[in-house]
Structure formats: structure tokens, C-alpha cells
Amino acid sequence: MSSVTGFLKYDREDPPKRPVEERVKDFHELEMRLPLERLKTQASRCMDCGIPYCHAFGCPLGNLIPDFNDMVYRGHWELALELLHSTNNFPEITGRVCPAPCEAACTLSINQSPVTIRNIELEIAEHGWEQGWIHPEKPSYRTGKKVAIVGSGPAGLAAAQQLVRSGHEVIVFEKDSAVGGLLRYGIPDFKLEKWVIDRRIEQMQSEGVVFEIGVEAGLDISARYMKRSFDAILITTGARVPRDLNIPGRNLTGIHFALEFLKQQNRINNGETIPPEERITAAGKNVVVIGGGDTGSDCVGTSRRQGAKQITQIELLPEPPKVRKETNPWPTWLQIMRTSSSQEEGCNRLWSILTKKFIGKDNRVKKLSCVKLEWEKSGAFQFREIPGSEFEIEADLVLLATGFIHTEHGPLVKDMEIDLDNRGNIIVDSSFMSSKPGIFAAGDSVLGPSLVVKAINHGRLAARGIDYYLRVASQ
């Protein structure tokens, strides 16, 4: 098991980042790479901890983390890649964008810095691409069964790859102009450059996956046609309905949902032309981002690169503690104060703030009227407004990063007549089949807004359920 005592000899070393003054001038990835020898040293910090909570508790995919760390330490990179691919279709993506719950569950996290699991995962995958170890894995035979997958986000892509490798004919329908879902349009290039996605798509096409882009299932092709033409259908449309802020002034110009803003910049980075009247830009503006999560942070980084005059990020919840509290024990997710790479680049951060209304002039937003909150824990986590704490924030552009609610309840979901839960998510059984035989769902359309790594896991599990249905249950 690695060097067993490596964690006593070596400190954690994170990959370096490009200097702030350099990286804010472009949208290229900001994280750099460590030499392989130093990665071997980091892998040696993985201890013989008995019960590896990193993959048994922390990783939704169940990645074999101690095993691939051991292979990296011993220099067996190809075996490390084989172990990684046995549970994860896209480690070069999760290695870039996953928040690494595995590291929060690392045994070293009890009183030390955890193993750099996410970075080791990324480098195993990138080394595999560089060495030519990653190539199309075509099935040895075809089953003659056809599967339609609606949506090409992480869940849809993982399911498509698993199913095509099982010998089924797979067609993925994507309503946008390129494949990738939120991986392509929701995550900024400075965290995930899109050639990373394109490289996998080429592999999947060589394996036999067919992508139909610019096709909205339920509109461009009917639910009735799909049920008649395919042996199974998998819905992986994500949770794209944003949570709105229905307060006075919401209809003013200059207030946008975060995804609308991020998607447009990613389209521009991809070489697409945006009409001037549709352009959302932070250049020279006072920007206010409402929401303190990852999406809000992505809005901060994108606004900084567009040349914002000033950026303020406000959060309804209280400021997190700087150290772990007793009520947040290991190996649960560490709820402490974090500063993202985007926040490092410059923004004002405010906590316990409630936006009461938007104030405008000539139908454009100019200010936010806010109030400070006091939080109290008495059974439920509740807040009250602090009397006399009202204040205003100047804003020429407001970005709502307040989360998502559920999957879109458009023609596809309605015409399929599938059941939804009380939150608006698709209900599935243990095999990921919906209330209608042969129609499956996975990812955020079932979970609600969640992590990329959970979506990949859902896609893999759904593919297993579909494969069983096509081979056994439907016969």
C-alpha cells in the first residue's frame, strides 16, 4: 500500500495556478500540472488506513482510490488508468471540476491535509491520453437493440458509452448546437477547456455512438415517434429550471440568470457570433452576483475576465466557520470557509444578505436594496432581518446564481406521461426505469441539481438497468 509512512514524510502539494494577473486576461485553464515524480510523492501519502472512506463513503462513483494511488506510487500508470476507468468514464473531466468529496473523507483529513486525490486522478487520465492508452473500445457484437438518450450531459454521455460498449445501438439527442450539456455550456473554459470534451466525443463516435445535435426531443421529434422507434429511452436532460428571485424590480433590464450569462461566454469562446443586442457583458460595470455557490463563483471569474469594474457576491447563508465544527464530523463534507480561484481574482463577498428589491432607472437596474440577516438555530435553521440594517449596492449587471429547481417539464416529459415527485423530478425505480416501461431517467433529472460525479454514476447505473431490460426483462 504505497509507502505506508509517506504521509509522515511529505506535505500535501497542490498543483500550481497561473498568476492572477496573467490568467484573468484569457479563458484558458488556470491550473497547471505537477511533474510525474512529484505526483508519485503525493500518491505515497495515501496511507494503509484499513477502511478507505475516500471511496467507500466519499466518492459517488466508488473510485478505487487507494489502489490507483498505489499504482501511481509504483509507477504502474497504465494499471492505474485501468482501475480508474473501471468506475469512471471521464476522469479527465472529474479531475478538473469535481469538488472532491473523496478528499473530505480521506482519513488524513481528521487532523492533516488530505491526499491530492482529484489531481492524481486527473494526471492518470492525461498521462493515459499522452501515452495513447485511451482508445475506442468497440463491442465484439451487436444486439440489434436501439436506445435513445435525450441530453448529452455527464449522465447521458456515461450511459451512452456503457450501452454502446454493450453492443446496443445508441443515438444521443441534444437540443444545443454542440454535445456536452452543462459540461460545455455551464462550466467556464478556465476550469474545463472544451477540447477535453471533444476528445472523448471522438472516442465515443468511433465506438459507435451517434449524436444528433440541434434536435429537441418532444418538439423536433415526438415522444410518440421515439417510443415507436426505440427499444428503450433514457432521459438525462438535467435540472435546468433556474430558481428565480420574484421581488420588485425583477423585470428590469440587466438582470440575468447565471446560466444564460455563462452559456453565452462559452459560445463566444467556441467561435460563435452573438448579436450585439443579445450580448450580456460585465465590461466596465458594477456586477452583483446573487448566490455564493460554484455557479456564482463561475460568474465572478467570467465577469473578471470580461473586464468588470467591480464585483460583489452576496450570499443568503451565514459566513462558514474557518475550522471544522463538532457538528460537522469527519468523514462528512467539510463545511468551512473556502475561497475559490475566481474569488481569489477579486470580488467583495457578503454573507447573511437578503435582497429585497431591485431599483432601476430608465428601465435598467441600478441598485439592489438589501438587508442584513441574523441566523438562529432553533430546530429549523431560521433567520430574521436585523432592524435598521438596510443598505443599497450599486449594480449595472445582476446575475442570479440561486440554484436550479428541477428538470424541464416540456413536451417530452408531458407526452411521455411519466410520474414526477413533489419536487418536480422524474421518479425511477432501482433500475432507473420511470413509471412507463422502457423509459428510463438518470442524473439531475432524477436527483435535482447535483454533482457531475453523481451524474456520471447515475448514467452508468442507468445503463446497467437498460442493458438488463433489453436482454432479459423485455423478452
Image (cartoon, rainbow, N blue to C red):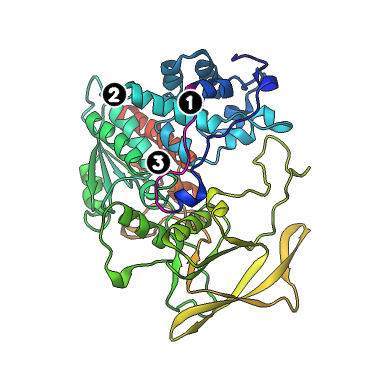
Instruction: Tell me the magenta residue range.
Output: 25-36
User: Is residue 351 located in the magenta-colored stretch of the structure?
Assistant: no
- What residue is pinned by disc 2? 137
Residue 407's tag is: none
Residue 268 place in picture, x, y as percent: 31, 57
Q: Are marks 1 and 2 in contact (CB under 8 Å)?
A: no
Q: Which residue is mark 3?
A: 155
Residue 278 is situated, as x and y percent measured from the top left of the image, at: 32, 69
Q: Residues within 10 Å of mark 2 (few under 14, many from 20)?
A: some
SS class of the residue under badge 2? loop
- The reply to whether callout 3 and callout 2 are in contact (CB within 8 Å) is no
> On the rendered structure, is 329 left or right of 90?
right
- What's under tag 1, amino acid-wise? Pro
The amino acid pointed to by label 3 is Ala
Distance in Å between CA atoms under marks 1 and 3: 32 Å
Disc nearest the viewer among 1 and 3: 1
Q: Which residue is mark 1?
A: 35
Q: Check disc 3 and report its element: helix, strand or loop.
A: helix
Q: Nearer the observer, disc 1 or disc 2?
A: 1
Q: Residue at x 50, y 67 (%)?
A: 309
Foreground: 37 or 437? 37
* Above or below, comparing residue 141 to residue 436 in the picture: above
Badge 1 element: loop
Q: Please state which of residues 211 and 178 is positioned toward the viewer in this rendering.
A: 178
Q: Quadrant of residue 51?
A: top right
Question: Picture coordinates of residue 74 (x, y %)?
Answer: 52, 13
Q: Nearer the viewer, residue 203 or 163?
A: 203
